[in-house]
Amino acid sequence: MSEEKKLFKVTIDNITVEVEPGTTILNAARQIGGEVTPPAMCYYSKLKNSGGKCRTCLVEVAAGSTADPRPMPKLVASCRTTVMDGMIVKNITSERVLDARAGVVEFLLLNHPLDCPICDQAGECHLQDLSYEHGKEGTRYEFNRRTFKKHDLGEYIQLHMTRCILCYRCVFVADQLTNKRAHGILDRGDHAEIATYIEKSLDNDFIGNVIDVCPVGALTDKTFRFKNRVWFTKPVDAHRDCSKCCGEVQLWMRGDEVFRVTARKDEWGEVKDSTKGGPGWICNECRFEKKDAKDWTIEGPTQVSRHSVISQGHYVNVVKPKETLPDVMGGRGPKLLMNIHNVSEVNSPEIELSKIAGPAHSDDFKNSLDNGK
Amino acid sequence: MGVKLLLEKAHVEGIRSYEVYRREGGYRAVEKALKTMSPDAVTEEVKKSGLRGRGGAGFPSGMKWSFLAKPEGVPRHLVCNADESEPGTFKDRYLMEFLPHLLIEGLIVSSFALGSNATYIYIRGEYAWIPDILEQAIAEAKANGWLGKNILGSGFDCEIYVQRGAGAYICGEETALIESLEGKRGNPRIKPPFPAVKGVWDRPTVVNNVETLAAVVPIINMGGEEYAKIGVGRSTGTKLISACGNINKPGVYEIDMTISVEEFIYSDEYCGGIKNGKRLKACIPGGSSVPILPANLLLKTAKGETRYMNYESLSDGGFATGSMMGSGGFIVLDEDQCIVKNTYTLARFYRHESCGQCSPCREGTGWMEKILKNIDMGKGKMSDIDLLWDIQRKIEGNTICPLGDAAAWPVAAAIRHFRDEFEWHVKNPQECLTRNYGLANYADPLVIPA
């Protein structure tokens, strides 16, 4: 099979990309990056069978393929739909998609407590990002939200079911990474919950990864709970020799203190592949028990997206995210709704602040307005 | 009067037993198919008959059978969907309870056509007494050589197994049914791949409704072309309708799809008119998930033509002024029924039965139920009606399986046709608790009983 593989051309929001057959629309869009990538709350590329559930990644297929250019009647889940040659996909250029996505965000937030101020996930929460980017202001929901008691899943992990959006990622982790799954979904519908049978503790070595895959603050690290906000800590890449896992981690530090250890994440919030091959899942020992900088070889600061809240504390190694909007809009840049420098009268050229003796007073501006017009 | 193909022998004494069924001409279709026809010829007959799936969607069955992937060396399966959980639909129960051998016969012929050596009947948990009836029928059929190894010397082996569900509406969705049959949580799978390629244990599978599979028997006996002559247009053959609600004679009726809705409701042969001489207000013609229709749109289409009991006529006008044949659960509401309460009851059902896998259905069904409950209790707001409309619009078509649509359509149709009743509930919060809105302008003045 050394012959050259035929690549499929797929156009997403006016940007064409060539991908291998069998790629999903979402992964094709991730190759382009930027705004044209649909958000994904339940899909996780490292977990088999994940995806298709949250419906945030819905896109419109305007043409199925070159051979059969009919559009698909329904919006499709981009994470589970594979591309065809000549497929034309509309994501942010489709009103239908934006409307449906706003609806999905509203549905996801219906029973979410929005307790971000006391939630450890705040700052790196996918649901927060999603609702900022795609949600609407305010809620139309006027009923009691469903609530659950907090559960301890073993000695390191706490389950706060109230925040859960039932993405099933942790179930897949338990299914695929650990040898005996002791937790799953009980009940159905809006009363479904993640649960362990009779509070059975999860003691597998890799179960800590459920914290990394949880898109919200439903599964949190008990060794880090309420210790710090993520944006006050600085992530650095580090490694150690571990007999169980790849040992490649991110340390979340403040000064010399290691507050938290997680697996390394890529720009989509998913666990990166390790340099030794395979996804870089880490073991419980690395995650929970090595909270001393002496345990680790520190490689340097992690690259953090400029848009991330973690970069706000003048963090070094900030990367500029790829901007795709001009491509989507056929070369035009996004139009500003209002350029504050044009409409503001504070900076009227008639007033030269340097010429005013002493601090400027509101009277200085008032006079100029009255005199000038 | 009408042609009866399925229920013809339903009233013969002891038809449930093998001896009587065989004496009445049973298992002739198996003999004919296995001795004189090839599997492809059976499929061809079903295609010719124009038989459409009786479970709700109305997809042509012969076509579905021909989509079945047939890779070399991989076993194929036929699954009979007996998880009939749609509120208002009880035709399959009747068929399985009184004519179990008809279903078994249909299953043997269909298994032969599809090459399924292990065929499953997935039956809903609430039908607790029916698996015993079916298992007895299977044992009788096996004892008489209709099942097992080398049936009738044709070299075809077939076994039928009965699997009970645990009582979930969602397990009537074919991929959820397959998951449940495999012993997993009954969550619908994401399609593609379709069951015809990867079904039970990742093998090619056909999932058909009980009535569809039973209808294969008359098709083989009389020939596909002959069967296609019954009925009208693309609605061929006969259809079982389970009529219930405010009618004089609720029950399961076999119709040949040429009678009008008016005749079906008012003639003594079928429903026998509205109970207690009341007037007809509305009707859900195809099981709880299809849109409800007010009386004037039920009897006549928007164009003023008579509406008939068949797939095309019932869906005439799209969802704006029409409905669907669905699974044949015909629910009649008289002038004393409250549409808001009815919609709330349905919304409560769908909220309870949503599997909770995808977010629009999981959260949306619960939200709609709460709003409808408020309106029903006289605590609603005018803006709630528009909100309901918006919620159903955002659920419909955005979910993994059709349960989201099924939950959205009844709410949409109720608001579309009965908006004034919703508004009356909001404006008269006290009065709506003590009396019903009544008929308003929905009832067809033509049909006031004398």
Image (tube, rainbow, N blue to C red):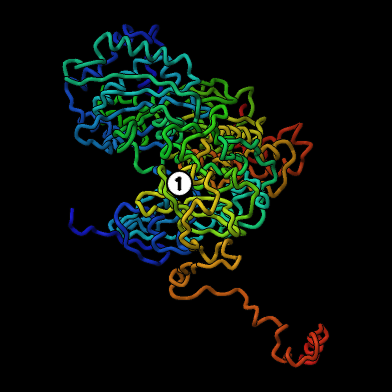
Residue B284 placement, left or right of B334: left
- Relative depth, front residue between B369 and B284: B369
Side (left or right) of B407 relative to A162: left
Q: Quadrant of the N terminus of chain B?
A: top left
What residue lies at 29% left-to-right and 34% top-to-bottom?
B204
- How packed mark 1 is, by other alpha carbons closer than 10 Å (few <14, some 14-19, many 20 or more), is many
In which image quadrant can residue B133 be found?
top left
Residue type for callout 1: Ile
Circle 1 sits in a helix, a strand or a loop, which is it?
Answer: loop
Q: Disc 1 marks which residue?
A: A282
The spot of residue B63 in percent (x, y) is 29, 38
Identified at 59% across, 68% down, the residue is A314
Which residue occupies 66% across, 38% down?
Answer: A147
- The answer to which of A358 and B318 lies nearer the viewer is A358
Q: Is residue B367 left or right of residue B127?
A: right
Marked residue chain, label 1: A
